[in-house]
Image (cartoon, coloured by chain):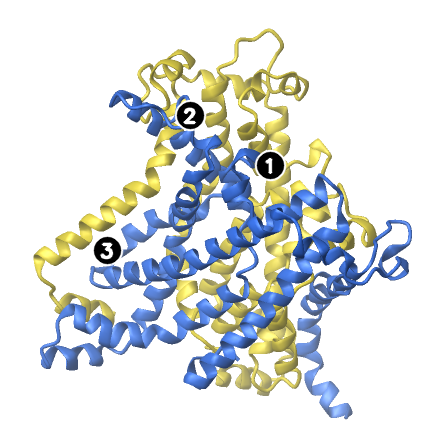
Amino acid sequence: MKDYATTLARKPLPVGKLIIHLIFIALCAACVFPFLVIIGTSFQSENDIVRFGYSILPKNFTWDAYRVILHAPKTLLQSYFVTIATTVVGSIVGMWVTTTYAYAISRKDYRFRSFLAFFIFFTMLFHGGMVPSYILMVKWLGLKNTALALILPYLISGWFVMLMKGFLQTIPEAVIESAKIDGAGELRIFAQIVLPISKPALATLGLFFALQYWNDWWLTLLYVENDNLMKLQYLLIRVLKNMEYLNSAEAIEYGLVKPGMLVPSLSARMAMCILAAGPMLLVFPLFQKYFVQGLTVGSVKG
Amino acid sequence: MIRVIKKNAGLSMLALPGFLLIIVFNYVPLYGLLLPFKSYRYNLGIWNSPWVGFDNFGFLFNGDALYRVLRNTILYNMTFIVLGTTLSVIIALLLYELSRRFVRAYQTILFIPYFISWVVAGFAFRSLFDMEYGVINRFLVSLGEEPIMWYSDPKYWPYIIVIAAVWKGLGYSSVIYYAALMGIDSEYYDAAKIDGASKIRQAFSISVPMIKPIIIMLVILQIGSICYSDFGLFYNVTLNSSLLYSTTDVIDTFVYRSLIDLGDIGMASAAGFFQSIVGFCLVLVTNTVVKKINPENSLF
C-alpha cells in the first residue's frame, strides 16, 4: 500500500504518461491480435476465407466449423480427458513433492539443508540431455505409451523448488518453533501450519504446474504413439501441420468427420485451436494476480 | 548420532519423495553422459556397448549442418538475452510509472501469450503469415504488392523467431523485474526528487542499479543454457519446415531429428553432451567473472 501511495505522489509529466500508455496499448494490441484473428476465422465461412483471407470480423457469421468438429467429437473428447487427467494428477503430485522438498531446504535448522539445496540446484546447471532421458523412460522404466510418461518427467524441477523455497523462507521461524514446543511433529507442522499460510504461493505453484501439464505436447511427441493417449496440444500439432487434415482419410478414420461430408477445413482448424486453448485463455488470466504475487516473493534471491 | 537422525527424520521424510524423483529423473540420466563415447546397441545397454572414443563427436568437426545449427543456436540465444532482458527491464520501468490499476490491466494482457502453448502460438503466427490466407499477405495484396512466401523463404525467419520469442516471454520476464522494482525502498526516490533528479535520471541511477543483482542472476542462468533452445518455438512456429532450416535449425531440433528420424543415438547424445558441458563451463566462467567484479551479484 505504501508503494501505491508513493506511485500516486510521484506525478510524472502528463505527456510522458500518455506516451507510456500508448506504448502499452500498442503492445497489448500486438499480444491479442493473432488470437482475435483465430477467433474471427473460426466463425467464418469457407468461401469467405478463400475470398478475403483470415480476418477478425467474419463477413458471414457461421457456427459450421464448430458443428463439424463437435459432430463426431470422439478424438477431441479423448484428448480432453487425457489432458485434464494428466493435468490434475501431475499438478497435485507435483505440488506435493515440490512443496515438501522446498520446505525441508527452507528450514534453517535442518541438518541436510545445504546438501539438498545444492542437490536440486545442480540439476539446473547440468543435465544428461534428451537421449539419456529418452533411454531412461523407454528402456529402463518401460514407460513408452503409458500415462505415467506424460506425468513423471515434470513432477519436480529446480525452478519450481527454488520459487517455493523463496516463499517458504519468509515464514517466521518463531511460528514453527512454537508449534514444536507444543509437541507437533514435522508432518503435522507442515500440513497444519505451513500449508495454510502458504496459500498464495501454493496457488502460484499450482498454476505453474497446471500450465505446464495443460500445454505439454513434447512428452506426447517423444513417448506416446497410442492415439488414445494423445494430448490436446499434440492433436493440434497434427491439425496445424496438415492443412488438409480434416479432409484426409486419417480424420475420417479418427471419427473427426464423416465420409462424404463437405468440410470447412480452414475454419475448422481455427475452431479446433480455440477448443484446445480456450480453457487456458479464459481461466488463467483470472489467476494472473496470484502469478504476479507468487513471482514477487519467489524471485527474491536467497 | 541417533539424536541427529531423530532430530532430522521428520524433514527428511518430507523431502524424500522429491529426493527420489530428482535422483531418478535428473541424476540417473547423467550416466548417459557415457553414451557419446560408446557405439550404442539396444540389446547391450549403455555399459556393455563398445567404446568408440571420440568417433561420435566427428560430426562436431565436419559437416555443414553443425556449423549452421551452432551458429543459429548461439546467435538466437544471444539476441534473446540482450534484447529480451533490455526490453523486459524497459517494460518494467515503464510499468513502474503507472498506477496499480493500469499495471494489472496491461500485465494481464501481456501475459496472454505466455499462457498458451507454442503449438497455439504456431496457429497464431500461421494466421498472420499464411501464404494464401494470412492477414499480412492479404494486406500486401490489397496494397497492390506481391505476397511474400514466408514459409519457404528462410531470410525472414531470424526476425519472426525473435519477435515470437519476445512476444511470448515479455509478460513473464517483465513481471519479475517489476516485482524487483517494487521492492526498492521509496526513500531513494524521495531523496533523488529533492535533489531534482529527472525521471530518466532516477531510472538509471536508482532503479536499474537496484535490480542489477536479479538481472545478472537471470542472465547467468540464460548464458548457461546458451546451447539449448526452446524446442517448441523452433518446431511449431516454423511448422518444422525443412525449407527454413538454414535459419531456423538449432541444436535441439537437430538432435530431435537425428534421434527420431534417423535413430542416430551416437550423434544425438554427443550433441547433448556438448550442450551440457559448454553450458556448465559458461556458467562457471561467467559466475567467476561476476564474482571478481562484485561478489554480491554472483549466483553461487
Up-down: is A68 above or below B217? above
Asked whether B4 or A138 is in front, the reply is A138
Quadrant of residue A76 in the image?
A: top right
The residue shown at (45%, 75%) is A301
Quadrant of residue A177 in the image?
A: bottom right
How far across and how far down the image is residue B146, in percent? 33, 23
The residue shown at (58%, 52%) is B67
The residue pinned by badge 2 equals B131
Quarter in which the N terminus of chain B is drawn: bottom right
Spot the yellow chain and give its letter: A
Which SS class for mark 3? helix
Which SS class for mark 2? loop
* Residue type indicated by callout 1: Tyr
How far across and how far down the image is residue A221, in percent? 66, 41
**Foreground mark, 1 or 3?**
1
Up-down: is A242 above or below A188? above
**Foreground mark, 1 or 2?**
2
The residue pinned by badge 3 equals B101
Chain hosting mark 1: A
Disc 1 to disc 3: CB gap under 8 Å: no
Asked whether B224 or B103 is in front, the reply is B224
Q: Which circle marks residue B253 in the picture?
A: none
Label 1 – label 2 distance at C-alpha: 23 Å
Total tally of numbered discs in the picture: 3
The residue shown at (19%, 67%) is A7
* Residue type indicated by callout 3: Arg
How far across and how far down the image is residue B287, in percent? 50, 77
Other-residue count near label 1 (Cα within 10 Å), few / some / many at <14 / 14–19 / ≥20: many
Which residue is the extreme one toward the front? B62
Spot the blue chain and give its letter: B
* Residue type indicated by callout 2: Met
The residue shown at (35%, 65%) is B177
